Image: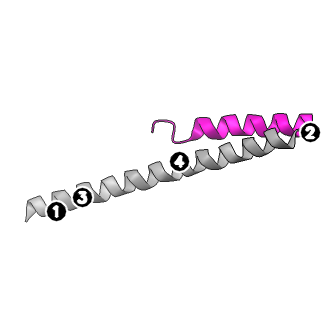
Amino acid sequence: MADRGFTDQLKGKAKEVIGEVTGDDRIKAKGLAEQVIGKAKEVAADVKDAMEDVAEKTREKLNKE
């Protein structure tokens, strides 16, 4: 995932602010939820990258032996 959830976090923050300004708790809650989803996507992408690095290093080590 290229943006690692950044877009979801940004859209969520915008909705949160709009909900806060307009007093619409539903929009505010949707914005907060989108931010959480975006952060989860970001963390998942980081974990995936780390696991790919571990797998590559393991393959390299096994090929040397």
As for residue 28 lying within the magenta part, the answer is: no
- Name the dominant secondary structure of the magenta segment: helix
- Quadrant the C terminus occupies: bottom left
| Residue 4 drawn at (x, y percent) | 51, 42
- Counting other residues with Cα less than 10 Å from the Cα at mark 2, is it few (<14), some (14-19), or many (20 or more)? few
How far apart in space, not on screen, are marks 4 and 2 (Cα)? 29 Å
Give the magenta range.
Answer: 1-23
Q: Earlier in the sequence, mark 3 or mark 2?
A: 2
- Residue at coordinates 91% horizontally, 34% vertically from top-left? 22
Q: Quadrant of residue 58?
A: bottom left
Q: Which amino acid lies under the numbered mark 1 shown in the image of this protein?
A: Lys
Residue depicted at x 84% and y 37%: 19
Rounded to the nearest angstrom, the CA distance separating label 1 from label 3 is 6 Å
- Cα distance in 3D space between marks 2 and 1: 58 Å
> Which residue in the rendered view is the most extreme toward the left?
65
Mark 4 packing: few (<14 Cα in 10 Å), some, or many (20+)?
many
Quadrant, the N terminus: top left
- Label 4 belongs to which residue? 42
Circles 1, 3 touching at the beta carbon (< 8 Å): yes
Q: Position of residue 32 (x, y in %)?
A: 73, 46
- Which residue position holds label 1? 61
Which residue type carries mark 3? Lys
Q: Secondary structure at mark 2?
A: loop
x and y percent of residue 13 in the render?
73, 39
- C-beta proximity under 8 Å, tags 2 and 1: no
Image quadrant in which you'd find residue 60: bottom left
- Which is more foreground, mark 3 or mark 4? 4
Residue indicated by mark 2: 23
The type of residue carrying mark 2 is: Gly
